[in-house]
Every structure is written in C-alpha cells, then in structure tokens.
Image (cartoon, rainbow, N blue to C red):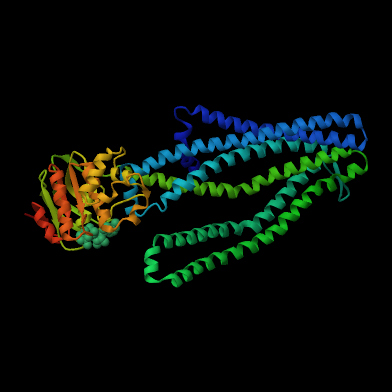
Amino acid sequence: MSVMRDFWILARPFWVRRGHYLAWLLLASIIALGLLLVQLNVRFSYWNKEFYDALAAFDRPRLYPLMGQYCLLVGAAVVMSVYLDWLRKLLILKWREHMTESLSRAWLSNNVFYRLSLAGEPDNPDQRLAEDINLLVTESLDLLRSFISAVARILSFSVLLWTLSSELSLPFVDSQLRIPGYLFWFAIIYALIGSLIAERIGAILQGLNYTQQQREAELRADLLRRRDHAEQISLYGGAAHEQRRVMQRFAALALNWRQLMNRERTLGFFTSSYDRISGLVPIFAALPSFMNKSLSLGGLMQIETAFNQTASAMSWFVRAYRAIAEWKATVQRLTQFRIALEAAREPRQPRQAASFAAHQLSVHTPDGTVLLAGLDWQIETAVWTRIEGPSGIGKSTLLRTLAGVWPYYSGDFSQPRGRSLFVPQRAYLATDSLAALLAYPALDLPSREAMQQALCDCGLAALSTRLDDVAEWSAVLSGGEQQRLAIARALLFAPDYLLLDEATSQLDLPAARALLCMLRSRLPQTTVIGVTHQDKLSSLFERVIELPQQAPAAH
Ligand SMILES: Nc1ncnc2c1ncn2[C@@H]1O[C@H](COP(=O)(O)OP(=O)(O)OP(=O)(O)O)[C@@H](O)[C@H]1O
C-alpha cells in the first residue's frame, strides 16, 4: 500500500487546498455522469426488448412511440458522454496545472535544478514535469472512473442477465445438474478465458511498445542534434557520416517495429475473432429458450446486450493490472523526483557577512575529489580581485562556490549581502527579443535609452535598433559579440558583486581591455572577482589570489 501513500503525497496538495471544492465537484460530476450512462445503457437494453418484440408482432402503433423514446435516449446519451469527456479534460487540466506549477517551482527555485544536474539524478526531469505529471493525472482519473463504471455495469447487467436466463438443466452422472442464471456464469467464464488469452498473447507487446517509444525518441534526438550542429557538420563535410548514423538508428527502430507488428498480427487474429463471435455467443447460448418460445425476440436481444456488457466489465478486472502497473511506475518515478527535490531543496547556505571570505575552505568535485583545500582569505569591497592558477586547478569551480551554486565544499565561507551577477565564458542567450536578453535575469525591462546606451558602451551600437527583434542570438552573434552582450547585461544589472569567468576570452586584448576599463568606470562601487587567462589584463586587477595545488596562498 506504500504506492497509495506515495500517490496521496503527490495528489494531496491539489485535493486538499483552498478552493479544492471545485475539483471535488468536478470529480463527483464525472462519477455521477458515468453511473447515469450505465443506467441509460440498462434503459437501452429494455428499449431493445420492447422494440424487437413490437417488430416480431408487426405492432405498428407501438413502434412510433418507441422511436420517439429512442431519440430521447440517444440525445441524453450523447449529451452525457460529451460532457463527461469535457469535464474529465477540465479536471485533468486543473490538476495538471497545479502539479506542474508546484513541482516546477520546487525544481527551479533555489538552484535545485542545477544541483540535481550535478549529482546526475534523477534522469530527465523535463520528462517528469511534462509527461509523467500528465500520465499520473490522466491514469489516476481514468482508472478510478473505469473501475466504478465496471462495478456498476456488473451489478446492473448481471442482475438483468440472471433474471433473463432460465435454469439450465444438464445430465450429470445419474441425475440432472441444475444451473440457475446459467447465462450469467457463462458470461463470466467467457470473459475470463477471452481476457486471459488476450493477455498471454499481448503481454510481450508492453515491452516492445516501450522499446519502440525509446527508439523513436533516440531517432528524433539524433536528428535534432544535427540541426543544432548544422554549421560544424557542413564545415567538416560530414553529411555521409551523418546519413549513415541516421540510418543505423532507423534500422534499430525498424527491427523492433517488425517484432511489434508480428506480435500485433497474432493478437489481431484473436481479438477480431473474439469481437465478432461475442455478438453471437449469447444468442446461441439463449437459443434453446427462444426456440421453445419461453423467450421472446426482444428478450433474446436484451440478453445479447446484458451478456456483452457483463463480459466486457468482467474483462476490465483481468486487463486492469497492466494499467495499474503503468500507474504504479508513474507514481514511483514522480515520487523519486519529489524526494530528490526535497533533498536538494535546502543547500548549505554560506554565512552572510560584509564581504567574501574563506576560512579553511575546501572545494571538491561531485565524486569527492578534492580540487582546492585550506583556502583562507578575505576580499575587500569595491576591489578587483583576480584568481590565478594553472588550467584545471578549479578556478571556475571556486567562482561557482562563491556564487553560492556549487554545493560540494567543506569549511567555511561568507557571502556579502547585495546583488550579485555571474558572467560565464559562454553567456546564456535564450531565443527571445534582444531587449529581454539584455534585461536577463531581471524580469522588468530597463528603459530603451539605458539599453541602447549599454549596447553602444560595449561596442554593439549596430544592434541598438534591433531591441525588439526575436532571434536565436547565440547563433546570430559571434563569440566576441556574445561576450560584449553579457557585459552590457552586467552594466544594466549594476550588481554589487560581479564574478567574471573568462568573460572576455573571445575578444582580442585591446578590445577586452577597453571593455573592462569601461566596466570599471561605469560600476566603480562593484566588487569584481575574475578569472582570466589573458595575462595582459592582470594590471586591471588590484589583487591576485593564487591557487597552488593543495597549498593555498594569497598576496
Ligand atoms: N560538474 C562537474 N562534475 C565533475 N567534475 C567537474 C565538474 N565541474 C568541474 N569539474 C572538474 O573540476 C576540475 C576543475 O575544473 P574548473 O573548470 O574549475 O578548472 P579551471 O581551473 O577553471 O580550468 P580552466 O582554467 O582550464 O578553465 C576539472 O578537472 C573538472 O573536470
């Protein structure tokens, strides 16, 4: 039952919250409509009886009111099933919206998504948020609905079937074996045997379908990668190589597809025969009563409906285990995600102090390899400090630690209060308007004049007329231009603390120097901590912290 507990932990925030009455009202309406539809089907079966009896008796005056009744019944059934589906979708939408909002907030807030990506788990959070929430909501509602409907159908139609079927008397040893309501028992045994055979043939389909989805996703991802690296591929002249890889992926997909279609063919032989036979089986079974005139034509038709409804409701119990298994797997995946989010929610927070300071600080990689150990220093406010050390020693990782996003450290360090901004070597440029990119990560746009001025200051005057243009700027701008844009962003954001990680590496030295000098004159109060391999820029920094392997030093 732990799966039910896990499910309730996931579902509870939606079903037990302020304004949850609407959700419960929707659920109650969906269940009520489902039950009404079952009752309507029972009513249809009575209509069938009366109609065929009137036909058999050539009773014209009874036929006309029956046709009127039929129109009413059909009208009611159409309105009910359309609204049932509509309300079901509305509830799915509301539930899904609530879960997406709360899980994506837990994922995105406090840099949880970044820490989870470092730790490498859980896999594919995007799939959890998009597909699994949808599956959980849809499967939960549909399982509940189909369970209630199956129970209601069995209760309503089996009673009908029992009353309609006479007692069967079979010779058994020296006496007669009497089976009351034999059609009811027959419907149950028929449904059980049919569903079990279908399950046996179809069991392997589940695995094949799963593999098929995976292969399709791999092919799609592979084709997307080609789109993302179009330029590099054409520069290498790698088209033939790429074509071969695409066809290799397709061959794996086709191999599974063949197995799937062969298995579906076998299942198809069984299900189409079963479906066709199901229409006649109850008629043949009740034929003796019809022939000895104890059953009317209408009664025969009613038996056919009641038999098939009972049989299909029974087979739900045989087949539901697969839907329940899928639902359980979805609950488990989302529970893992929820637990991972909760575990990563509260990172160790650095102390808040007047400035950045490290005391016996050690930084390591996610697998525990120590990169830097025993760091002891303090960084003065409004001073430009450069962190220096050989490639691979851990300079960028130290900057991430100071920014408060790298959780793998021990010892102690403090962060100053105030606004800080990190400018990485490769700026993040989403596909958006240039104005929105300049404002990032602030939500409000600065004035147009301020943005145009920042672009001019950073040597991007040519872009100042394109603030509203939406483009894939990371593909449109050169590497150097992207770095200029990131500095323009910093100018507009005007942080108290600026962490620069190789932020001018793609510019020539005079351009890099001019850009940083301009930054310094525009943001004189900002404390800057930088990492750069451009040694000629070192004169811009007032202080250097050198990072020798495992032996810290500062001067
Ligand atoms: N997310 C990560 N997972 C595992 N190892 C990592 C991760 N990030 C960095 N490292 C490892 O930490 C070490 C230091 O990397 P870092 O980028 O901090 O060095 P660096 O001094 O800035 O290097 P460079 O000067 O070449 O840019 C590297 O060996 C790198 O492989």
Front residue of 258/487: it is 487
* Furthest residue toward left: 555
Query: 266 left or right of 441?
Result: right
* In the depicted structure, whether residue 257 falls above or below residue 349: below
Query: 394 left or right of 544?
Result: right
- The image quadrant that residue 265 belongs to is bottom right
Front residue of 291/447: it is 447
Front residue of 354/35: it is 354
Front residue of 470/138: it is 470
Residue for point 48% across, 71% down: 244
The quarter of the picture where the C terminus appears is bottom left
Give the image location of residue 269, x and y in percent: 72, 59
Give the image location of residue 54, x and y in percent: 89, 34
- The reply to whether residue 66 is visible in this rendering is yes
- The reply to whether residue 180 is visible in this rendering is no
Residue for point 31% across, 55% down: 477
Give the image location of residue 248, x and y in percent: 50, 69
- The image quadrant that residue 17 belongs to is top left
- In this figure, what is the number of numbered marks? 0
Query: 26 left or right of 277?
Result: left
Quadrant field for ligand 1: bottom left
